[in-house]
């Protein structure tokens, strides 16, 4: 690899490193409403015990296989699609 290409790659890597990494949280309000989602358990049932739950970095940054593009599913939440883990 010649010096020009090597320098260009280094500059590109440095430029990428300067781009801030921003985790964008999002809610899928349409699906939440249709699935009667709530941020609290119901009758002892909660998202963290559901087979559809996708654990994230914190208790409020989780996903659900039923809620596309929703990253704010609460571990203590619940919806009508609850299915207990086996
Ligand atoms: S299906 Fe409902 S209860 Fe199960 S993880 Fe998703 S939001 Fe929570």
Image (cartoon, grey):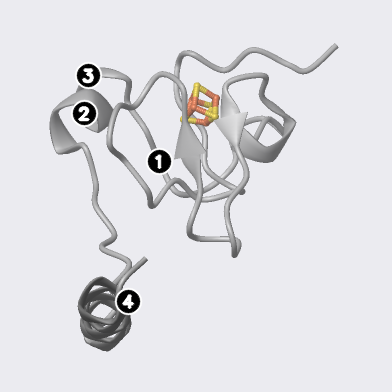
Q: CA distance from mark 1 to mark 3?
A: 11 Å
Q: Which residue is mark 3?
A: 34
The tag earlier along the polypeptide, 1 or 2, is: 2
- Say if mark 4 contacts mark 1, CB within 8 Å: no
Q: Residues within 10 Å of mark 1 (few under 14, many from 20)?
A: some
- Residue depicted at x 22% and y 19%: 34
The secondary element bearing badge 3 is classed as helix
Is 80 in front, or is 24? 24
* Residue 27 horizontal side relative to residue 38, left or right: left
**Vertical arrangement, residue 24 with respect to residue 51, above or below:** below
Q: Residues within 10 Å of mark 4 (few under 14, many from 20)?
A: few
Q: Which residue is mark 2?
A: 33
Q: Residue furthest right?
A: 86
Q: CA distance from mark 4 to mark 1?
A: 53 Å
Q: Which residue is mark 4?
A: 6
Q: CA distance from mark 1 to mark 2?
A: 9 Å
The tag earlier along the polypeptide, 4 or 1, is: 4
Is 37 in front, or is 10? 10
**Vertical arrangement, residue 28 with respect to residue 5, above or below:** above
Query: Image quadrant for the N terminus?
Result: bottom left
* Residue 33 horizontal side relative to residue 2, left or right: left
Q: Which residue is mark 1?
A: 38
User: Is the CB of the residue bearing disc 2 within 8 angstroms of ligand 1?
Assistant: no
- Residue depicted at x 24% and y 46%: 27
Res 24 quadrant in image? bottom left
**Vertical arrangement, residue 56 with respect to residue 43, above or below:** below
- Say if mark 2 contacts mark 3, CB within 8 Å: yes
Q: CA distance from mark 3 to mark 4?
A: 54 Å
Across the whole image, how many numbered discs are drawn on residues? 4
The secondary element bearing badge 4 is classed as helix
């Amino acid at each position: 690899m010649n010096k020009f290409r090597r320098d260009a790659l280094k500059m590109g890597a440095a430029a990428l490193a300067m781009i801030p990494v921003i985790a964008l949280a999002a809610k899928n309000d349409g699906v939440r409403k249709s699935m009667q989602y709530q941020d609290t358990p119901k009758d002892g049932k909660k998202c963290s015990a559901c087979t559809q739950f996708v654990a994230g970095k914190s208790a409020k940054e989780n996903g659900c296989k039923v809620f596309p593009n929703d990253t704010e599913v609460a571990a203590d939440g619940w919806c009508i699609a609850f299915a207990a883990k086996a």
